[in-house]
Amino acid sequence: MQVSEAQDPPVTSYAYKASLIGSAHRFELTDEGLSWHIAGRSGVWRYDEISAVRLSFRPVSMQQHRFRADISRIKGGRISILSTSWQTAALMAPQDNGFRAFIVELHARMAKAGSRAALTAGLGRNTYTAVLAFLALLAVAMAGLLIRALITGEFAGVLFILGFAALFVWQVGGFVRRNQPRAYSFDQLPAGLLP
């Protein structure tokens, strides 16, 4: 009995739990396309049917290092894939390597299939503009408080405002920098939006 040397290409898969309740969201990259199983529903989207992919950085209080991919289909529908999975009521675990490998392979298979999908990174332009406007207003308010604290001689207040501002810039600065709206190509995935 002879074993054939021709083998099917390996199936790349990824799964995560979006919440503590319910089953895991499971995805596979097969020869037919992107196979998905979410909350009792399933389907297969051919790679050339995917109309858009948006990569973004979406930290939450339980996990400051979380990434997201939103995948849209020409015939309608959208799938979100997160880089973290709920483990317990108090623990959300990162799945950086699995998420990165899955997203990179998805792009490679889409390119091979001749996909014409819109590849975008970061937040939508309107959302990003609103975030920048809010941050500008906050900066003006903080500057006003700092000036008032300096004029009145409240040096403890000055230190508090400077410390708060430094922490805020450190936390929010990375989010704003990573989520700047832009387009990318299949061979140039945005490194800041992959773990």
Image (cartoon, helix red, strand yellow):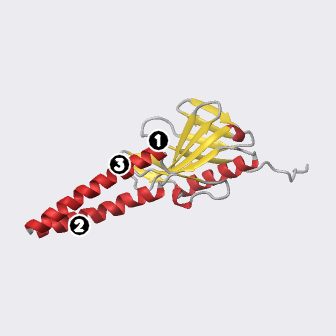
* 21 relative position to 12: left or right: left
Q: Earlier in the sequence, mark 2 or mark 1?
A: 1
Disc 3 secondary structure class: loop
Quarter where residue 144 is shown = bottom left
**Which residue corresponds to the image point at 23% horizontal and 55% vertical from the top-left?**
141
Q: Position of residue 27 (x, y in %)?
A: 61, 42
Give above or below for 7 relative to 170: above
Q: Position of residue 190 (x, y in %)?
A: 57, 58
Of badges 3 and 2, the one in the foreground is 2
Q: Position of residue 121 (x, y in %)?
A: 54, 51
3D distance between C-alphas at marks 3 and 1: 14 Å
> Is residue 149 in sight in this rendering?
yes
- Dot label at residue 108: none
**Which residue corresponds to the image point at 75% horizontal and 45% vertical from the top-left?**
113
Q: Position of residue 154 (x, y in %)?
A: 10, 67
- Dot label at residue 162: 2
